[in-house]
Image (cartoon, grey):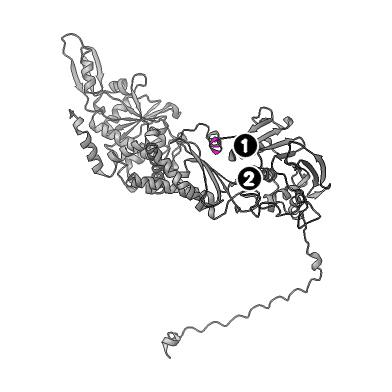
Amino acid sequence: MNDDLFGPARTPGPKPAPRKEAPTPQAAKPADDSYSAKDIEVLEGLEPVRRRPGMYIGGTDETALHHLAAEILDNAMDEAVAGHASFIEVSLEAGNVLAVRDNGRGIPVDPHPKFKHLSALEVILTTLHSGGKFGGKAYDTSGGLHGVGSSVVNALSEMLDVEVARDRILWKQSYARGAPTTKLLNAGPVQNRRGTLIRFRPDRQIFPDLSFSPARLYRLCRSKAYLFRGVVIRWSCDPSLLKAGGDIPASAELHFPGGLRDSLEADINGAARIVPLWSGEADLPGERTGRLEWAVAWLENADAFLHSYCNTVPTVQGGTHEAGFRAALLKGFRTWGEHRANRRAAQIVADDILGAMAAKLSVFIREPQFQGQTKEKLTSAEATRLVEQALTDRFDHFLAGDPTQADNLLAFLIERAEDRLRRKELKDAPRKSATRRLRLPGKLTDCTLEDAARTEIFLVEGDSAGGSAKQARDRATQAVLPLRGKILNVASASTEKLRQNQELKDLIEALGCGVGDRFDRTRLRYGRVIIMTDADVDGAHIASLLMTFFYRELPELVRNGHVYLAQPPLYRLTQGAKSVYAMNDADRERKMKQFKGTAKVDVSRFKGLGEMPPASLKETTMDPAKRTLLKVVALPEERARTNDLVESLMGRRPELRFAFIQERAKTVTEVDI
């Protein structure tokens, strides 16, 4: 047999087991003549909305109830955005009745060409997918694009009254649960009035025990006014509906010429910013595609958020316009990093940018596509490209306009990126409880008081200094942790070395607050972390290494003022019974002039904290009533300069340190060894 044609010959194997017979299938059920065409129900008009309201407004809860208000207000906003209305009145009346009025063109009332026996008004209020927003002729951009908003509100209202003022004539009609209860009536001529008024009460059969929230409606009106600076929204509420002591006014005129910038300023409420707030607006590229408005603030410690809108409709689940926004910012920061020859900028990802950013983004585009009738997510594919193109150049100009601020912002984001990468790799010891005090480092001599705000820990150089500090301390409030020599330089060490370093593990364990994604400042066991090293060059080097550790690995402790430098003296000057201490050579010369007479002044130079008598150490360095502490701070406006300095002096590139020394060597006049 030819194996090439038929495959390799099979090797004889065991005889297969006899096949089991398949079970006999059950006999089919006899036909059920009771199921026939008469069981097929056809829902007409607005009956599908009343049967399945969740398909149109997401449910029958409080959020769905307020979606009805948003639908009617969106229609009025579309008139304003299109330039036909300048004000909108929103009034919450007693009895859970909401009225929305605009001074726009008014809903058409002439006979509909397809349904000649119905007015256009009645078609809009009783027919799904009807309206003036499909063809793009009546509205360039609109939020109520699906043509179901007004009809759904009508279907789910036990009462809805509409008034339309067009061509100086007032027209009225009433509805109940989607069906007209009166004909369209000509109420006579009117002067100085135009537009549409809709008053409705949600159906208690659909929304039992639910009422409109004045606070929620007021916030909705305010957000709409922020989103379109060309409209004034006049809010009013029956005083009986307002809670005593609440901050919702009974009436207000909402108009914000600053648009989204005003809105963001109100939301962040004075929070500390890395750079000044950036805002603007621009036309989207292409012909009649729409426009874009944005406001962005990068914050030091406040919660981040991105609120986006399309045609004044809040897109709470984001969408394609947010994708373009993220892409433009990420591209801008990486480009700026390349321009400034900062290779570390390549580490930045979109989450690093968004995680410290408070922003608002509003787009107006033609025929947007949303995910579902509740419009919570924009899915228009072209929005990503349009937003990215509109923002990229403007963001580049924003960065180039103030290079110092741009560098500070970039440094801040690089810190976040490096922190994210460390969190991904670093596995630190579990958090420790301030009360249980279990498995603390063996060399730690802890204090007895458990109130972190009143305690402090001294980080000292070696066991000898640790012995003196333990004798000089206040046992109730002061803890001492000796560290062995010069700790690891975290700016130049790999993550693996950092993870394996016992001295740093002991330090992290003693502090109790964790690092990386396990950091929790509320778990910090001491209010002050005091670096106390010898008053010489080696001591300064160890202090620099510790400050680098805190700046890189525990920056929150620096930002919140927990890290300090002790100031031990270098000299003791004695004449008879009088002794004074000097911090350095210059201070020694000044203090020598304080002694009078011809008696000799003995000058003792401390070789280290370990050789300083505990009484002297307490008096000069550890007693809160007499000591001097320097707080370690990192100024936000100097972030880029600080990062560059740490990288130059402590990083992995020795040529940067060499250049630093060369530049400053001429300023050194004396080296005290």
User: Can residue 486 be found in the magenta stretch?
Assistant: no
Q: Is residue 446 above or below residue 658?
A: above
Residues under labels 2 and 1: Cα distance? 19 Å
Viewer-nearest of discs 2 and 1? 2
Say what amino acid the circle numbered 1 marks.
Arg
Can you say which quadrant of the picture contains the N terminus?
bottom left
- The answer to whether residue 211 shows anywhere in this view is no
Q: Which residue is mark 1?
A: 222
* Nearer to the camera, 237 or 194: 194
- The answer to whether residue 501 shows anywhere in this view is yes
Give the percent coordinates (x, y) of residue 659.
Answer: 23, 39
User: Can residue 261 be found in the magenta stretch?
Assistant: yes
Tell me the residue at 24%/37% (across/down): 660
Q: Which residue is mark 2?
A: 82
Q: Looking at this rendering, what residue extends furthest in the right direction?
A: 182
Horizontally, residue 590 falls left or right of residue 478, namely left
Displayed quadrant of residue 419? top left
Horizontally, residue 257 falls left or right of residue 435, namely right
User: Which mark is first along the chain, 1 or 2?
Assistant: 2
Range of residues picked out in magenta: 259-264
Give the percent coordinates (x, y) of residue 486.
Answer: 27, 37
Say what amino acid the circle numbered 2 marks.
Ala
Quick one: label 2, few (<14), some, or many (20+) residues within 10 Å?
some
